[in-house]
Image: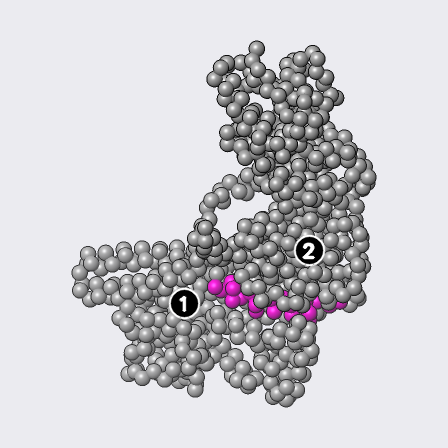
Amino acid sequence: MSSSADSDQAFIEAAMPAFISEAGEQIEAIEMLLLELEAQPDNRELLDSLFRCAHTVKGSAGIFGLNRVVEFTHHVETLLDKMRDGEIALTPDISSLLLKCNDQIKFLVDTATDENADTLELKEGRADLVTQLQALSDGATPAGGGSAVSAQYAPAVATADLPDNALRTWSISARFGTDTFRNGMDPLSIARYLGTLGQVISMRCGSDTVPTLPNLDPESCYISFFMDLETTKGREDIEGAFSFAADDCELDVVAPETPGQKLARAIEAMPETPRLGEMLVQVGAVTQDKLDQVLSSQQKTAGMPRAAQAKIGDLLEAQAGVPPEAVAAALGKQQKIRDNAPSEDRYIRVQADRLDAVINLLGELVIAGAGATMLARETRNTSLTEANLHMNSLIEEIRNGTLGLRMVPVGETFNRFRRVVRDTASSLGKEVNFEIEGGDAELDKSMVEKIADPLMHLVRNSLDHGLEMPQERTASGKPAAGRLILSAKHETGAILIRIEDDGRGINRERVLQRAWNKGLVEQGVTPSDDAINMLIFEPGFSTAEQVTNLSGRGVGMDVVRRNIEALRGSLRLNNNPGKGLQVDIRLPLTLAIIDGFMVGVGKSKFVLPLESVVEVIEAADASTKVDSTGRHCLELRGQVLPVVRLRSLYSVESTLPERVSVVVVNSTKGKYGIEVEVLMGQQQTVIKPLGRLFKNLRGISGSSILGSGEVALILDVSSMGDLVTGQAQLSTAVH
Amino acid sequence: MSVVFELPPELNIYSAPDTRDALLAWVTTQTAQSKGALEISARNVVEVDGAGLQLLAALSNMEQPWHVVETSAPFSEACKTLGLAGWIDARYLNNTTQVAT
């Protein structure tokens, strides 16, 4: 006995992480659905999905015996159910309440294994939420007090469908537990009592599950019943009949449906069926003859331009009198089939650690492969070299494929901001239209996780400081609701994430004044416009006022910049004073391996990201004078090209060669040249981070181990661009 | 015709174990003797509950056909209430029995 209990416990422990992760997904979905539902409160499908998500969380939490989750989610579910029945309509306040409840469910799920995490204060907060939920579910205005969600509730009777005391037909299905009789309950008396509530339209006893006489335990209950009850009573009265048997009984009380809804449900329940007409015929919404007629009349419009062609759904509604709900459900079902068909069973859940281990091994494989290639070249054995080349191209494919496994659409992270934007905007009293573009652009998973916080900060910053109050906006001729656009797109080996608002932009004079006051810039010195904009990312620029406004996160914009730079990313501001601000974040797609272009100076080797290399030119004279940071210029097709000489920049010891090459690279600061001595060509480069000692080394972003075991430094084209174009000088002045 | 099984006046949870045993024994004997439909009388039934009706449901899930030949008002009412009115089929009822409505 105890061993089976032990194995149960072991099973629960083993399955718990999967539960938490899956429940997490459901919880995220609930949040998304709620936000979507706010925009389209009449969308029944969203509401159904919402209910299903909550129900799934509750159900699976029940399996794991997480009673706190089950109890709390039950209240949420009850409210959602009332909403499904059309008794309560979604208002922004209810939505806020449900979002808070969802946070609570998330907390309960996350701390499922830790009883101590649930402090008295949290319990009280939860009890408060439950009171509000119950007040809503009971159809009363929730008691005010304490919470932000208060007096504005109105138990909205939905769409004037049916008054509370109208005669309706409820479908009741009750499956009784085996202990029902032993607990003194009797399905017969419950059925008898239900009969007193109204008129029993139909009653069916589910006796198929009763064992045959020889196998029957006469004291165990195996029966269930399905009743259609026409009554003026509400759900509560019906459920009340089961109150004593509640623990032993699986009860479903389904609200009355209009014929259209009934058809819609039948369609929803149908197995995958592709054609609209067939679906409707199958559920009896239209006869085959009628469908044929409609189809033939649709044929007549076939030759017309697309816009003029009649849609089968419209024709069925107009000519065959099919209820619009049924057509909508059938169309929805078709869409779902299309959406789901290819994706079914195509995902497997893999632990991130395993994937990381594979990627680490892959890094080693790339290095080993490079070593083998080098040795093969030294043997001058053609077939060995060829075999090696083939192997290397396979390694490259595996590399791309494996790194692709870690790629996730950035949209998932973006979607999380909907909630932040909604809550922040409403707490600030601002109106915001939040748009997401290019959410399907993919980025390395670890990168997505690390970028979330800086992004969140920038989004909040835009809301807080960028967008003006509605009256201020109207006064300056802008629409009252501000726009905030979060977009992502791929750009040569990098991803560009842009946060764009149509707020007031950066006030350069004020920024400069503050920078002067704080000693970030020498009094009287006026840097370039771009440099002034970037001052907001300097440490010590953020004021105390800002920190409180940003919910006391205590993270300044300098941290945002540092985080982004730590990801080898760059930040750029496009300021349009009075009109808006655009923050561009460029991030490499992956942190692990890049295609590199290897160059040499003396005995040192450097790697440039291949995608930044534009061309390589030969420099006639290596003895051109350079300044202290190794900079000089040369002429490239009539244009001045700033060039940095690595030998001078990093004081590499070498004998001055006769000829040098200049690698022309493209950076966010524009084109410039890097003067090197040897070109070694393309090389897959596994990026290893530099130690803390080298963190402040400018122009170097990491290191890589070569096949020969040597170390090559990876040049950071963007920060080296700062050095070359003179930004570095300015920046030191700022410090 | 074959012997009719008389359901007890108390067709409920209290008598269910005994009734089950009796019914099972009777069914076994009857099936061994004839292949016709078993006949059950509910004329004496005064008290009935879900557990009592479940016994007949268990019988229904066995191979042997059966029908009610006589009924009492409480039994008929209970069958009707629980959606088992099909058991009270007028075709099989003896003329003397009264069918409750």
The amino acid type of the residue labelled 1 equals Pro
* SS under mark 1: strand
Front one among B67 and A43: B67
- What residue is disc 2 on? A98
Q: Which residues are magenta?
A: A446-469
- What is the spatial separation of the Cα atoms under label 1 and label 2, in whole angstroms? 48 Å
Residue A292 quadrant: top right
Residue A321 percent location from the top left of the image = 71, 27
Residue A96 quadrant: bottom right
Q: What residue is drawn where x is 74% and y is 35%?
A: A193
Q: Is residue A499 magenta?
A: no
* Residue B88 numbered tag: none
Residue A413 percent location from the top left of the image = 56, 60
- What residue is disc 1 on? A609
Q: What residue is drawn where x is 77% and y is 34%?
A: A196
Q: What residue is drawn where x is 17% and y is 64%?
A: A379
Residue A720 at least partly seen: yes
